[in-house]
Image (spheres, helix red, strand yellow):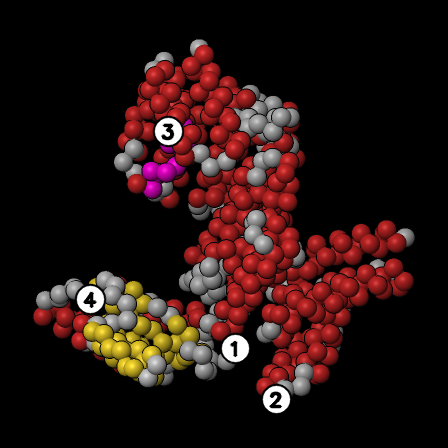
């Protein structure tokens, strides 16, 4: 029974934390108070649910307890300034939450919360941290571990961000229609960054960081619930699911990276792929393509090929062409070159790669020389390929990729 | 949320030399922006500054007044003017300031005042 209520509290924490915090911020206007009172409410749930049973609507129970705690705290606040704030806040609380919400009628303020957390006036690292803390409910210690910084540093980052929201007058609301597309793009960028932080962590020692992928997907699914009519929200969620579905096959038992071509496709997560493709279909029915939908479509091409040889590279090359029109990114053009090489041969791909050599933004990007090396290798130009692998090795950021490039270089010189 | 006052330093290339006509056109555009913001009741103050080379910078150390010529920081971008507005929040400030004619030429900073 205790184990049952423990997991009920854990489940409620996962499902309801963001909503409780979001509602408390809406009613009190005080981010610190909102988080502290939400924490208190979950502590009370741990103490009382084993004795009294799990309430019928855990979210309403938690919000009511947290709200009462906030009222208590505000009543007890002593200073003159706090009393003024108390009066203002209490009248707002009375307006919004009196009578206490019964099943289902708690306002869902999470959308306001995520737009505020991802406001472009906040530093990017603070947007990411604040989203994980206030919306996903990760502790400061967990976020610090995930981003490899001391807990105190992460704590300061969060405090500064909350203070900036207050001091700079960053509004707690869903942006008005003219701003919405741009700001939604900002929110999606934060979620994608979060996912990539986790996805880049490929070894067992990085398990905490890998958890970021699951958090990003969870938050993206919340955003789908909150903005069901936005095709790019659906597109990003599809993209994350499709990429995540390949995770188990990306690394072999020895912790080495496995290229898409060599991955054991039976290890791909079918359900994730099906979910991703269903979301992508729903997105495309809107007839408003965007960068995340196109990237998801590319991922879907890979995911639905039974073997690497069955990959529809012509379609992928077309999609990268479309993506380049939407984003004008040289990284996209590099990927298009790889797809073109698969369709028209390595020489055609190399021509596109060579055209990118002058792109300043790719100057330190290891995948540019790595791609060149691979194309040169396939053209039988061994010496030039070896030189390009050396160039890539000088720039490569992760150990797993470094080992992969070394293996390729060794095969080249051995052959 | 209570209103916030924002100081908007308008920065531009200090060495940029505009033709008389261009300068007059910008002045006129800035003045009509000021008039519109006054009409909306958000503008508290606005002004242009003379070149940063006309400035002096001083520090008092051990009762000594140390004076140097020029602005605090010798950078290419210098404050060329400022606007003081009173807005509901950061988003309103951004929306208003993004219509300022000089935002197209230089950079504008949206800086909340410490006092409300």
To the question of a shared chain for discs 2 and 3, the answer is yes
Instruction: Work out how far the residue at label 2 is from the one at label 1, CA to CA, in angstroms.
Output: 19 Å
Label 2: chain letter: A
Question: Would you say A275 lies left or right of A232 here?
Answer: right
Question: Could you tell me what secondary structure mostly forms the magenta stretch?
Answer: helix
Place of residue A199 in the rendered image (x, y in percent of width and height, measured from the top left)? 56, 40
Q: Quadrant of the C terminus of chain A?
A: top left
Q: Element type at marker 3?
A: helix
Q: Residue at x 53, y 43 (%)?
A: A196
What residue would you read off at disc 4? B14
What residue would you read off at disc 2? A80
State yes or no: discs 2 and 4 in contact (Cβ < 8 Å). no
Question: Which span is picked out in magenta?
Answer: A361-370
What residue would you read off at disc 3? A391
Q: Residue at x 55, y 28 (%)?
A: A257
Q: Element type at marker 1?
A: loop
Residue B1 badge: 1
Place of residue A247 in the rendered image (x, y in percent of width and height, measured from the top left)? 60, 34
Question: Would you say A180 lies left or right of A133 here?
Answer: left
Going by the picture, which residue comes out furthest to the top? A415
**Label 3, residues with CA under 10 Å away: few <14, some 14-19, many ≥20:** some
Up-down: is A29 above or below A193?
below
Q: Nearer the viewer, mark 1 or mark 3?
A: 3
Instruction: Work out how far the residue at label 1 is from the one at label 4, CA to CA, in angstroms.
Output: 37 Å
Label 1: chain letter: B
State yes or no: discs 2 and 3 in contact (Cβ < 8 Å). no
Going by the picture, which residue comes out furthest to the left? B20
Instruction: Work out how far the residue at label 2 is from the one at label 4, CA to CA, in angstroms.
Output: 47 Å
The residue nearer to you, when weighing A151 against A362, is A151
The residue nearer to you, when weighing A229 against A223, is A223
To the question of a shared chain for discs 2 and 1, the answer is no
State yes or no: discs 1 and 4 in contact (Cβ < 8 Å). no
């Amino acid at each position: 029974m205790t184990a049952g209520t423990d997991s009920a509290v854990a489940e409620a924490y996962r499902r309801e934390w963001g909503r409780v915090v979001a509602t408390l911020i809406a009613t009190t206007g005080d981010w610190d108070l909102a988080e502290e009172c939400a924490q208190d409410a979950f502590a009370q749930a741990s103490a009382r649910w084993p004795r009294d049973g799990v309430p019928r609507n855990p979210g309403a129970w938690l919000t009511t307890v947290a709200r009462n705690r906030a009222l208590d705290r505000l009543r007890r606040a002593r200073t003159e300034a706090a009393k003024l704030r108390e009066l203002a806040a209490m009248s707002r609380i009375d307006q919004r939450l009196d009578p206490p919400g019964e099943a289902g009628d708690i306002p869902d303020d999470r959308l306001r919360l995520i737009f505020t957390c991802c406001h472009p006036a906040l530093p990017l690292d603070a947007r990411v941290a604040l989203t994980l803390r206030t919306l996903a409910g990760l502790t400061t210690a967990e976020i610090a571990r995930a981003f490899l910084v001391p807990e105190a540093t992460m704590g300061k980052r969060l405090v500064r961000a909350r203070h900036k929201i207050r001091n700079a007058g960053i509004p707690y609301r869903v942006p008005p229609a003219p701003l919405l597309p741009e700001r939604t793009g900002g929110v999606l960028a934060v979620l994608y960054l979060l996912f990539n932080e986790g996805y880049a962590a490929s070894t067992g020692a990085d398990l905490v960081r890998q958890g970021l992928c699951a958090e990003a997907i969870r938050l993206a699914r919340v955003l789908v619930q909150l903005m069901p009519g936005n095709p790019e929200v659906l597109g990003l969620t599809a993209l994350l699911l499709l990429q995540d579905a390949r995770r188990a096959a990306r690394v072999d038992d020895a912790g080495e990276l496995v290229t898409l071509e060599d991955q054991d496709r039976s290890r791909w997560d079918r359900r994730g792929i099906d979910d991703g493709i269903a979301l992508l279909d729903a997105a495309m029915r809107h007839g408003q393509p965007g960068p995340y939908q196109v990237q998801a479509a590319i991922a879907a091409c890979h995911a639905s090929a039974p073997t690497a040889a069955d990959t529809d590279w012509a379609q992928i090359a077309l999609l990268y062409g479309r993506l380049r029109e939407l984003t004008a990114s040289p990284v996209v053009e590099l990927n298009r070159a790889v797809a073109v090489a698969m369709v028209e041969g390595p020489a055609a791909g190399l021509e596109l790669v060579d055209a990118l050599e002058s792109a300043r933004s790719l100057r330190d990007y290891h995948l540019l020389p790595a791609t060149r090396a691979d194309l040169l290798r396939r053209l039988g130009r061994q010496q030039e390929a070896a030189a390009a692998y050396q160039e890539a090795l000088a720039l490569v950021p992760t150990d797993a990729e470094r080992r992969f490039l070394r293996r390729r270089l060794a095969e080249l010189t051995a052959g | 949320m209570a209103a916030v006052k924002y100081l908007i330093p308008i920065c531009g290339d200090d060495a940029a030399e505009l033709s008389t006509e261009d300068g007059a056109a910008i002045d006129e555009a800035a003045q009509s922006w000021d008039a519109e913001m006054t009409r909306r009741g958000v503008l508290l103050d606005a002004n242009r500054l003379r070149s940063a080379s006309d400035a002096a910078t001083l520090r008092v150390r051990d009762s000594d007044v140390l004076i140097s010529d020029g602005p605090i920081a010798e950078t290419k971008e210098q404050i060329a003017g400022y606007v003081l507005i009173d807005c509901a929040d950061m988003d309103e400030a951004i929306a208003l300031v993004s219509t300022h004619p000089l935002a197209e030429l230089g950079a504008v900073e949206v800086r909340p005042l410490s006092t409300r």
